[in-house]
Amino acid sequence: MSKTKQIPKLRIDKKAKTTILNYGIIKDSIKSLTKQSGLIKEEILPYFEKQNAIVLVGMGNGYEGYAQRNRKSKRFDLAKFKESNPKLYAQYLTDSESTEIKVSFKVVDNAR
């Protein structure tokens, strides 16, 4: 006989709802920032065609530093392996489970 894990019942109060909403807002912000960073990356890549590093000084904005482009790596081509060795690929597949929380929200008033 298998034992089922008892999950304690939690009261979903205003604080819990706010935390859940904040999680959703952060996830949405990350998605938006990821899209923005991708667009900016496309814009700045040409500056790195002739040099690998750019010193970021003298901008007059209180920041300084450097930017560097140097990433070379080898990656396993999973799609090609799966196509070439479908039985071996299937042999090493394992079941997995993950927890994903999706939060939908909208602004209902301007009292933020």
Image (spheres, rainbow, N blue to C red):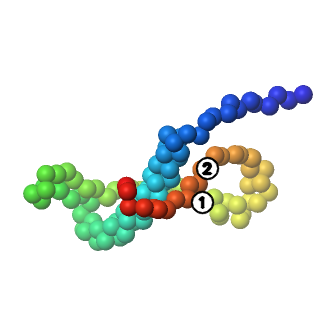
Viewport quadrant of the N terminus: top right
Q: Could you tell me the amino acid type at mark 1?
A: Asp
Q: Find disc 1 in the rendering and name its residue.
A: 77
Q: In the depicted view, which residue is nearer to us: 39 or 50?
A: 39
- Which residue is depicted at the point 53% across and 55% down? 75
Q: In the depicted view, which residue is nearer to us: 66 or 9?
A: 9
The location of residue 98, given as percent across then percent down, is 65, 46
99 displayed left or right of 36: right
- Which residue is depicted at the point 51% across and 42% down? 14
The location of residue 2, given as percent across then percent down, is 85, 29
Binning the other alpha carbons within 10 Å of mark 2 as few (below 14), some (14 to 19) or many (20 upward) gives: few
Q: Earlier in the sequence, mark 2 or mark 1?
A: 1
85 displayed left or right of 77: right
The answer to whether residue 49 is visible is no
The location of residue 100, given as percent across then percent down, is 61, 50
Q: Find disc 2 in the rendering and name its residue.
A: 100
Viewport quadrant of the C terminus: bottom left
**Splitting the image into 4 quarters, where does residue 59 fall?**
bottom left
62 displayed left or right of 67: left
- Which residue is depicted at the point 68% across and 30% down? 8
**Splitting the image into 4 quarters, where does residue 44 fall?**
bottom left
Secondary structure at badge 2 equals: loop
Q: In the depicted view, which residue is nearer to us: 72 or 2?
A: 2
- The answer to whether 4 is drawn above or below residue 45 in the figure is above
44 displayed left or right of 108: left
Mark 2 or 1, which is nearer the eye?
2
